[in-house]
Amino acid sequence: MNTDPMVPDLFRVQKVRKETLDTFTLELSPKQKKFRFEPGQFNMLYVSGAGEIPISISGNPNQPESLIHTTRAVGSVTNAMRKLKAGDYLGVRGPFGTKWPVDKAMGDDVVIITGGIGLAPLRPAVYDILAKRGRYGNVVLLYGARTPEDILYPKEIMGWRSRFDMDVHVTVDRAAGSWHSNVGVVTKLIPKAPFDPQNTTAFICGPEVMIRFTTQELKKRGLSDDKIYVSMERNMKCAIGFCGHCQLGPYFVCKDGPVFRYDEIKRLLEIREV
Amino acid sequence: METLKQYLQEHPFFEGLPENDVDLLVGCAKNVRFETGAQIFREGEKANQFFILRHGRVAIDIYSPGKGNITVETLDAGEVFGWSWLVPPFCWNFDARVIELTRAVAMDAECLRKKLKSDPRLGYEMFKRFAKVMTQRLQAQRVQLLDVYSA
Ligand SMILES: Cc1cc2nc3c(=O)[nH]c(=O)nc-3n(C[C@H](O)[C@H](O)[C@H](O)COP(=O)(O)OP(=O)(O)OC[C@H]3O[C@@H](n4cnc5c(N)ncnc54)[C@H](O)[C@@H]3O)c2cc1C
Ligand code: FES
């Protein structure tokens, strides 16, 4: 493994899986057999000739033999990445950044709220919590997607849903045909979700507008800001706190984040861009 | 067994209403049951009821030519739905379809309109409560329009 954090290691693409119309998962095989990371951390992925971007690790932290990333194709690098096939190579730097506070949350109920691709950065936290299930109170996952076809990891969600020790609620913005579950925004699931607001830690991952409405609903239930954790996104270059590209007020998202305690960044989220 | 009066008194929508108001409302209420797949109402039909969902799940659908029914919202136990009975021309704007066996309290609109007209204080009280429900739905739909998962 490279010791210089600015120099990527080459990883071989083991498997490519199409998840939804615009989302795919790459399974990479680490050169040194194991790639250890904490839930919430990300890697810088370099696609030859296209560029380098931050992508969260979405695999199981307790199974470091394969390195998994799920990506939504939105622009030049992610679309180039989508064209990779098994056997191709990809540059990887990482892991970087802060983690979901899975240890600190022990003893509490945990409510995980996410939408769209936001489930990918949270999946390692779900794996980790379920691996130590006995140490948590209620575990609740509230997930929103645009339509039933946009739901990420549907088989895995069904598996979680069938467990007796986890509450899983999925909602979509609109549905046609045979969808029999919730339709409406993910925040609508919060008032009835089974957690004790006095003893709950919340993890939220999604676009900032979703974070805003979600925190508002959690606060209506009585959760305090210091029990809410959010994952933030900013454009990145170095990922090690040098270049300043990812600055958010006094923080560098690559080093001080991407996972922040909500009370630490709340004020910055309220500032409107000019 | 819980009576209709008890149920309405304990429902958050009617919270704080004096007992004689609840008695008046109970006079317009009845228990109803819909099987899975039943159509509770359709767009354009006369809105002669509103509902308090006791159990089950109802889909609010818009029919789009070429695409069929698009569900834009689902409603669960405890929710109040249908406000077209309040505003002329008293016609439904959407379809309501049962996706899980549903039990509800149906309030007869004609009966209610008469009572509220002759008791403007209660009329104002009911409008205030419906305005709150409508504001919450409007807010939720605005968030939905923002397409928050891909912003
Ligand atoms: C810490 C961190 C973790 C991330 N984890 C993941 C992940 O697990 N999976 C994943 O798919 N993405 C993730 N992202 C976002 C990802 O890095 C960007 O989508 C990517 O950089 C876009 O690069 P591009 O060259 O394809 O798009 P660009 O060519 O840079 O942009 C094309 C278009 O996409 C828009 N765009 C750019 N970034 C985003 C974004 N984040 N969301 C929506 N639209 C965007 C741009 O505004 C532009 O309109 C993460 C970002 C950060 C900071
Ligand atoms: S990306 Fe360079 S400081 Fe964060």
Image (cartoon, coloured by chain):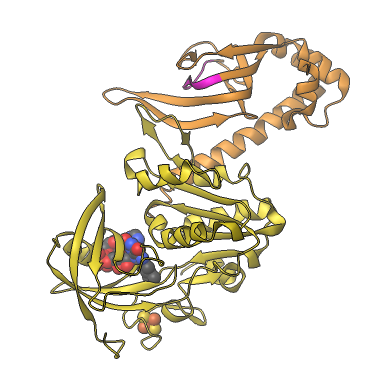
Chain colours: A yellow, B orange
The verdict on residue B96 being magenta is: yes
Relative side of B97 to B79, left or right: left
> Which quarter of the rendered image does ligand 1 occupy?
bottom left
A18 in relation to B121, above or below: below
Residue B141 visible at all? yes
> Which of these two is toward me, B91 or A176?
A176
Q: What's the magenta region?
A: B91-101
A229 in relation to B18, above or below: below
Residue A158 location (% of width, % of height): 41, 42
Secondary structure mostly seen in magenta is strand
Residue A234 visible at all? no
- The tally of labels here is 0
Residue A84 location (% of width, % of height): 15, 62
The verdict on residue A265 being magenta is: no
Residue that appears at 47% across and 42% down: A161
A150 in relation to B90, above or below: below
> Which of these two is toward me, B118 or A149?
A149
Relative side of A22 to A136, left or right: left
Residue that appears at 78% across and 16% down: B1
Residue A186 location (% of width, % of height): 50, 46
Residue that appears at 57% across and 24% down: B56
The quarter of the picture where residue A233 lies is bottom left
B47 in relation to A167, above or below: above
Relative side of A120 to B94, left or right: left
Which corner quadrant holds the N terminus of chain A? Answer: bottom left
Relative side of A232 to B49, left or right: left
The quarter of the picture where residue A242 lies is bottom left
Residue A3 location (% of width, % of height): 30, 90
